[in-house]
Image (cartoon, rainbow, N blue to C red):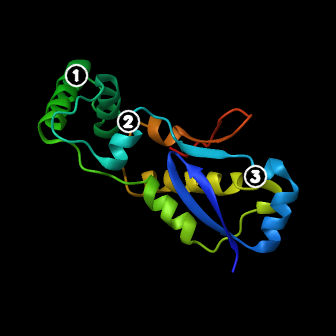
């Protein structure tokens, strides 16, 4: 039985069990235990994950991009009219949740795959989590303009954000 280490994941706590030998190695190297943050910073990421209630106002540009990408409408006036219809519908009915991050968190926590924990520390766990969430977005066909999947990142305190680019 290993020790449990907490990893902060986009405002949520995620417990990871680490074998004692790996934990001992991590504790020898403080850099490997540097706090890590992972998530998606597209402005609508939470709206996709948790849905929205009726009365929610969504950004016109994001919906306009989505209409062009998802529906393939290229005529500007038709695209603008369709965009307004989508915005009105979301305002009236809300948007259903399309979870992509939480399932990735659960899969990462429950999996038995090996992290290169001795060399990368908890950062490897955060990167795996974001990668799994990006796969969820693609495989589930989650409504996306392309910005959501591209906004997946990992951040280690004291360094720059690393964006993990999902394939489009």
Q: In this view, does 132 lie to the left or right of 74?
A: right
Residue under the point 70% across and 51% down: 123
Q: Mark 1 points at which residue?
A: 80
Q: Quadrant of the rendered structure where residue 164 is? A: top right
Q: Name the residue under label 2.
A: 44
Q: Mark 3 points at which residue?
A: 33
Crowding around mark 1 (Cα neighbors within 10 Å: few <14, some 14 to 19, many 20+) is some
Q: Are marks 2 and 1 in contact (CB under 8 Å)?
A: no
Mark 2 residue element: loop
Pinpoint residue 6: horizontal percent, then vertical percent.
Answer: 62, 58
Pinpoint residue 57: horizontal percent, then vertical percent.
Answer: 23, 28
Using the image as rendered, state which of residue 145 and residue 11 is in the foreground: 11
Crowding around mark 2 (Cα neighbors within 10 Å: few <14, some 14 to 19, many 20+) is some
Q: Quadrant of the rendered structure where residue 55 is? A: top left
Q: Quadrant of the rendered structure where residue 145 is? A: top left
Mark 3 residue element: helix
Q: In this view, does 22 lie to the left or right of 16?
A: right
The tag earlier along the polypeptide, 2 or 1, is 2
Using the image as rendered, state which of residue 57 and residue 134 is in the foreground: 57
The tag earlier along the polypeptide, 2 or 3, is 3
């Amino acid at each position: 039985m290993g020790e449990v280490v907490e990893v902060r994941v986009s405002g949520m706590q995620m417990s990871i069990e680490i074998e004692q030998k790996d934990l001992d190695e991590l504790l020898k190297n403080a850099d490997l235990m540097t706090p890590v943050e992972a998530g998606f910073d597209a402005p609508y990421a939470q709206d996709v994950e948790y849905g929205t209630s009726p009365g929610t106002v969504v950004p016109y540009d994001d919906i306009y991009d989505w209409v062009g990408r998802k529906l393939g409408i290229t005529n500007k006036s038709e695209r603008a009219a369709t965009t307004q219809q989508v915005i009105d519908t979301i305002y009236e009915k809300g948007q259903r949740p399309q979870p992509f991050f939480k399932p990735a968190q659960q899969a990462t926590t429950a999996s038995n795959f090996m992290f290169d924990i001795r060399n990368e520390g908890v950062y490897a766990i955060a990167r795996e989590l974001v990668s799994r969430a990006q796969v969820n977005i693609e495989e589930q066909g989650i409504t996306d303009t392309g910005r959501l999947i591209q906004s997946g990142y990992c951040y280690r305190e004291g360094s720059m954000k690393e964006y993990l680019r999902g394939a489009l």
